[in-house]
Amino acid sequence: MSSFFAMGGYAFYVWSSYGAALLILGGIAIFSMVRARQASRRLEELKRAAPHRRRREEAANGA
């Protein structure tokens, strides 16, 4: 089992590569979730700020 983790002398390179990839992908996932939450909040703000536009669109679709 220890020979598996030693990777034939390349363990530092292999495990540091896995660690870097995991860190980068985790950062991207967290960044994406934060940006999606911000975009959702901004969309709600814009919808509340412009209710007249929604009413006009509903009237045009209903008529």
Image (cartoon, rainbow, N blue to C red):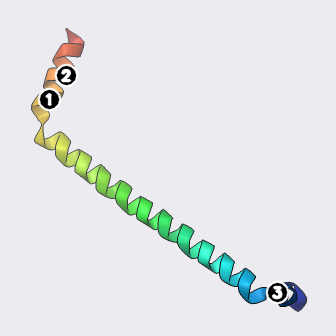
State which quadrant residue 14 falls in: bottom right
Residue displayed at 37% across by 62% down? 34
- Give the left or right position of residue 5, taking residue 48 as reference: right
Secondary structure found at label 2: helix
Residue 15 vs residue 49, the one in the foreground: 15
Label 3 with label 1: CB-CB less than 8 Å: no
N-term mark: 3 or 1: 3
Residue displayed at 49% across by 63% down? 29
- The residue to which callout 1 is attached is 53
- The nearer-to-camera label among 3 and 1 is 3
- Give, as a three-letter code, the residue at label 3: Phe
- The residue to which callout 2 is attached is 57
Secondary structure found at label 3: helix
- Where is residue 15? Give x, y as percent: 71, 83
- Give, as a three-letter code, the residue at label 2: Glu
**3D distance between C-alphas at marks 1 and 2:** 6 Å
On screen, residue 29 above or below 11: above
- Give the left or right position of residue 62, taking residue 56 as reference: right
- Give, as a three-letter code, the residue at label 1: Arg
Q: Residues within 10 Å of mark 1 (few under 14, many from 20)?
A: few
- The residue to which callout 3 is attached is 5
**3D distance between C-alphas at marks 3 and 1:** 62 Å
- The nearer-to-camera label among 2 and 3 is 3
- Where is residue 1? Give x, y as percent: 89, 87
